[in-house]
Image (cartoon, rainbow, N blue to C red):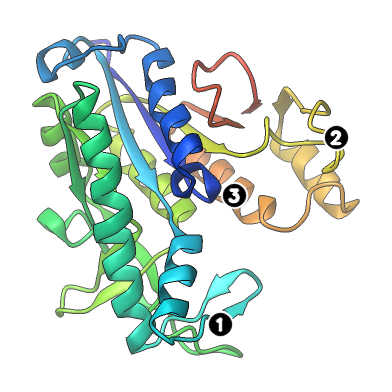
Amino acid sequence: MTKSRVTVIKVGGAVVEEPDKLEQLLEGFSAVPGLPASRSARQINNGEHVVLVHGGGRSATRIASLMGIESRMVDGRRITDEPMLDVVTMVYGGLVNKRIVAKLQARGVNALGVTGADLDLIRSHKRPVGSVDYGWVGDVERADGKALSDLIYKGIVPVVAPLTHDGRGHLLNTNADTMAAQVAEALAPFFDVTLTFAFEKAGVLLDADDDTSVIPRLSHEEYLTLKEKGVIAGGMIPKLDNAFEAISKGVGRVVITSASDLSGQGGTTLE
């Protein structure tokens, strides 16, 4: 039996936090294969489905500053003490998530905003203290693909905020790239899954300063070589690590592309 197709799209940074770029992203949903621009819940249920996973770190930093709460980062990772956990919960699960949901509803998309705590969708454990104490940061243990698939088959587009829980009443701040990969992996037994990381760049670049230097296809071996040479560095490394891990766990296709090109025709496809 042929599986229905689902595209898990992860967006973050300026893409969800600047109004013009957010509008461009949401308009780009009309280019996702099988999803016409004006689609109701009934129209979505045609063998093509979408899940959106978002970040919102810049907004969290801005709101924290307005509240007099210091933002501390180590290697690009946010230290999440109790005050910062309150901020990211408000911003990720509230402001950013509900803004996206409202704008999707205005476009005829039957979206539902969720965190990992809702329906026990994504459970994590608090990251152990090592050389750095990251505070209330969660490392994912499992995602419930069955619960997500039940929502999807009802014609709902889940919009997932980067918050999980530990099953003991604690919310946990969780990396959005990791969330997207875990969601894609959990859905793989039920769907033919494409995982798309959409951000400001056109794809994985040979030259970080040249937006035209997109690598169209990238194998794991080529990635390791380019990483060793320093061609691929910084925040792209955890993104690609998550992506290749997802492929190894049954995700059919991973694309890294610009938020303005969700058609799957551009960007970098991982092999």
**What residue is shown with label 1?**
72
When asked about the image quadrant of residue 269, the answer is top right
Residue 145, can we see it?
yes
Kind of element beneath mark 2:
loop
Q: Position of residue 256 (x, y in %)?
A: 60, 33
Residue 124 in sight: no
Residue 104 position within the rendered picture, expressed as x and y whole percent measured from the top left: 25, 31
Instruction: Specify which label sits upstream in the sequence, 3 or 2.
Output: 2
Label 3 amino acid? Lys
Horizontal side of residue 40 vs 195, given as left or right: left
Disc 2: which residue? 210
Q: Which residue is mark 3?
A: 239
Crowd band around label 3 with a 10 angstrom C-alpha radius: few (<14), some (14–19), many (20+): some
Q: Secondary structure at mark 1?
A: loop
Residue 108, horizontal then vertical, whole percent: 19, 21
Mark 3 or 1, which is nearer the eye?
A: 1
Question: What residue type is disc 2 on?
Answer: Asp
Pointers 3 and 2 in contact (CB under 8 A)? no
- Quadrant where the image shows the C terminus: top right
Q: Quadrant of the N terminus?
A: top left
Under tag 3, what secondary structure? helix
Disc 2 + disc 1, Cβ < 8 Å? no
C-alpha gap between disc 2 and disc 1: 30 Å
155 or 55, which is in the foreground?
55
Q: Is residue 118 above or below residue 28?
A: below
Mark 3 vs mark 1, CA separation in Å: 21 Å
- Asked if the residue under mark 1 is in contact with the one under mark 3, i.e. CB atoms within 8 Å, the reply is no
Q: Residue at x 38, y 82 (%)?
A: 67
Label 1 Cα neighbours within 10 Å, binned few <14 / some 14-19 / many ≥20 = some
Residue occupying the point 26% across, 59% down:
93
* Distance in Å between CA atoms under marks 3 and 2: 19 Å
